[in-house]
Structure formats: C-alpha cells, structure tokens
Image (tube, rainbow, N blue to C red):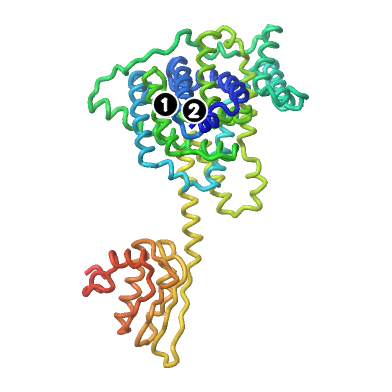
Amino acid sequence: MLHSLKQTWFSNIRGDILAGIVVALALIPEAIAFSIIAGVDPRVGLYASFCIAVVIAFVGGRPGMISAATGAMALLMVTLVREHGLQYLLAATLLCGVLQIGAGYLRLGSLMRFVSRSVVTGFVNALAILIFMAQLPELTNVTWHVYAMTAAGLGIIYLFPYVPKIGKVIPSPLVCILTLTAVAIYLGLDIRTVGDMGDLPDTLPIFLWPEVPLTFETLAIIFPYSAALAVVGLLESMMTATIVDDLTDTGSDKNRECKGQGVANIASGLLGGMAGCAMIGQSIINVKSGGRTRLSSLAAGVFLLLMVVFLGDWLSQIPMAALVAVMIMVAIGTFSWDSLRNLKKHPLSTNIVMVATVIVVVATHNLAYGVLAGVLLAAMFFANKVGHYMEVGSALDEAGEHRTYKVTGQVFFSSADKFVAAFDFKEALSKVTIDLSRAHFWDITAVAALDKVVVKLRREGTEVEVLGLNQASATIVDRFGVHDKPDAIDQLMGH
C-alpha cells in the first residue's frame, strides 16, 4: 500500500511540481480561449480546468495525464449555450459525467484495442495540426515584436536544455514564459497578453446546483449534447492515455479513466465549470517537463487556481507570444514525423487510414468523426485482407464420382462469395464431401454461403457430407443453417 502510494504520488516530486507549474501557466490562456469558443465567461473554463485536473489526479487511471477544459468539448457546447444558456450547460456537464461513469462500468475503455496504430497516428498528427492552427490568430496582423518574441521563445525552449547543470533541471517552457514576460515588462512592449483574453477570477469557486427544471423536457434538451460530450471526451482521453503510455513506457487502466473522467466532470459541473477531458498538448508538456505521477496533475490544478486568484495581476502580463511558442513546441513534439518517413515503407492501406483520419479531424475539427472514419476504414481493409486468406482445394477419387473439397481459412462476409465460387455445381457426381476441419465460420453470411452450396449440390442429385466443423463454427451453423432441415430448398429460395 505505502509502496504503491509512493510510486504513484511521490516518486518524482521535483519533476512533478515544476511540470505542474508549466502546465498551469499553459492552461490559463487555453481555458480562457475555450470559454470564449463555448460562449461563456472565462471563469467557467478556468474553474473547470482547476477542478478536473485536481479530481482526475485522485480518480483517473493514467498517472501524469492532464485533463481540463478542451477545445474539442467547447465546440460541442456552442449551440446549447446560445439557445438555452449557462445553466443548461452545467446540467449537461453533470449528465455527461454520469454517462462516462456508466461507460467505465460497462468496460467500454477496453474497446481501445480495436483502434489501430494507424488511426492513433492519424489522430496525433491531426491534433498537432489543430494545435498549430489555433496559434495562427496570435501570429496574424501583429507587429514584428510578436514574431521576434515567439522566435526567441522557441530558441529558449530548444536551446536551454543544453545549458550545463541547470538545463536539465528547470523545464525550458517555464524559462521561456518567465524570460519573455520579464523582457516584455522591462521594454514596455505593446503586445497582446493573457490579460487581454478576458478577466481572470478573483475568488475561489463555490458549490452550486444548475438552476434548471428537473423535467423530461430538460432531459430532452441536454441529453444529445451530454451524449456527444461523453463520447468525444472519452475518445480523446483514451487516445491521450495511449499516447502517454507510449511516451512513458508504462500502462494505464482505461476503464478506471472512463469513470475518473465522469467523476471529474460531475465535480466541474457542481463548481460552475464546463465539461472537459484529457488534453494531449498539456499532457505532452507535462511529460516533456518531467511530470510522471499523479502529483503533477494535482500540482497543475492547484497552481492554476492559486495563480489566477492570487497572482492574477502578474499572470495577466504574460505575453501571448510566450505561450504561442510553448504550444508550437507542443505541436512539433506531438506530430509523428516518423509517419512521414514511413509512408514509403508502410502498406498503402495503413497510409490511407492514417491520412484519412488526419483529413477528417482537421476538416471537421471533431475528433470523434476522424477516429470513426479511421476505424471503419481500418476494419474494411482488414476484412478485405483476411478474406484473401481463404482457399478451397479439391480432389476427385479414381472412380470419378466422389469429390472432396478442403476449405482452409476464415469464411465470413468478405470471403463468402469466394467460398461459393470455388464449387462446381454442374459436375456430375454421386457424392461430395466438404472438409471444414481447417476452416472457421464467423457469421450468418458464411452460414448462408454453406447452405447455398449444400442445397445447390443436392438439387443436382448429389449426396453431400459436411465434416470437420470446429465447435464454435458448428454452433453457429446449427443455429442459423437450414441445409439439414426438411424444407431447406424452399427456405433458401424464399418460397
């Protein structure tokens, strides 16, 4: 118990605290920006980011992963806020949390094993592009000072780690933020700052219950939004958890993460915050800055609240150029550059799935659509590929009256037509044996194909024997097959 507690909380204290400070600083402008996207007061996004980061530190399934208010979730809230107001958003946030807890108990987190590596790569690349694109408004129609500050920030981020002794101790993104803020204040530069994004809260959040009528009409209004928020939130969280698993060479409990996201969103809704989920950009900042355990997530949330409430005057002077430099670093670090180098090496189908996922996510700004498109494409390519590994060989006896067909491979919807086409129904034979000892029947399409073959042969006056079915195949054939039933021909022909 004590060993586990130390491992998940206190095995990397300095790295986690420093990483938490960097993440907290990077969370502030993003939380404000996402609040603006959703059409709510900046306090809603900031309170949500504090609350979700703190709660997920205790109940999440992936140590070191950062969860807070996100752009993907904010985009789904726009219509609800515009048509019904903030109170309905808070109610939808609570219901979203309940649905996510239900998904955790139904073990839907385990479905991540059906998401192929090419889909995850496409998802990561699309997020990197979206993170970079989100910085472009800060780099258009601005003075040369902003470009100089951003370039200087990137220089600090990438060169500071090479400074002897302290380069590896202090996270370079933190040095970038502090240095550029000091330069901007000292030179009195007239450039956009965090304070220009919106008012920072000056009080701690308080418990509140959404002021909406508890009726079926309210449920009908919020349920579609809650369901969409729950799905997108879990998808982004599961994907991010997988990426952090890879970055840290450790495992995580995806089903616990589903429940944790739900609990965090309920807590956020009760403190006046919007729904959120895991953030790939902030999680990578955390890992790259040295964060590894649950303490880094807790530190990020606590420092965020302390900063905005007690250090608001100082924080408001941080130039956006410094944070843009940090987010560009995140975009560069997030993008899988190996995926470009591997385009020539990997199969065409893998490349198509990856590129399609990127295109759909970037075009729609909806992670769920991109992942769904990628998974469907990957499934189609897989089914087509497996369908080619089904072969039917045959041998005729010396008398020329008995042919044995030997089926090898997987028979399912993709290979069923090939299975039927392998039989010669015009050959005059007294008996046909279909040996299925090296085959497996997966679905009712495969069973229907077997029915079709047997009934067609029998209709030509041929005796047919089916043998060698394994237990699983025999079960589905016995349940759905009709070739051994008295009225098989009528059933198959639909009379």
Which of the two discs, 2 and 1, labels the residue nearer the N terminus?
2
Q: Of the residues shown, which amino acid type is indicated by label 2?
A: Ser
| Marks 2 and 1 close (CB-CB < 8 Å) | yes
Q: Is residue 462 left or right of residue 152?
A: left
Residue at left offset 42%, top offset 29%: 76
Relative to 309, residue 324 above or below: below
Residue to which mark 2 is pinned: 67
Q: In this view of the protein, which residue sits in the foreground, 336 or 171? A: 171
Left or right side of 162 for 11? left
Q: Residue at x 39, y 30 (%)?
A: 262
Task: Find disc 1 in the rendering and name its residue.
Answer: 264
Q: Residue 206: which quarter of the image?
A: top left
The amino acid pointed to by label 1 is Ala
**Residue 292 appears in which quarter of the rendering?**
top right
Q: Position of residue 274 (x, y in %)?
A: 41, 22
For the residue labelled by badge 1, is the local secondary structure a helix, a strand or a loop?
helix
Up the image or down, 199 lies above or below 278; here it is above
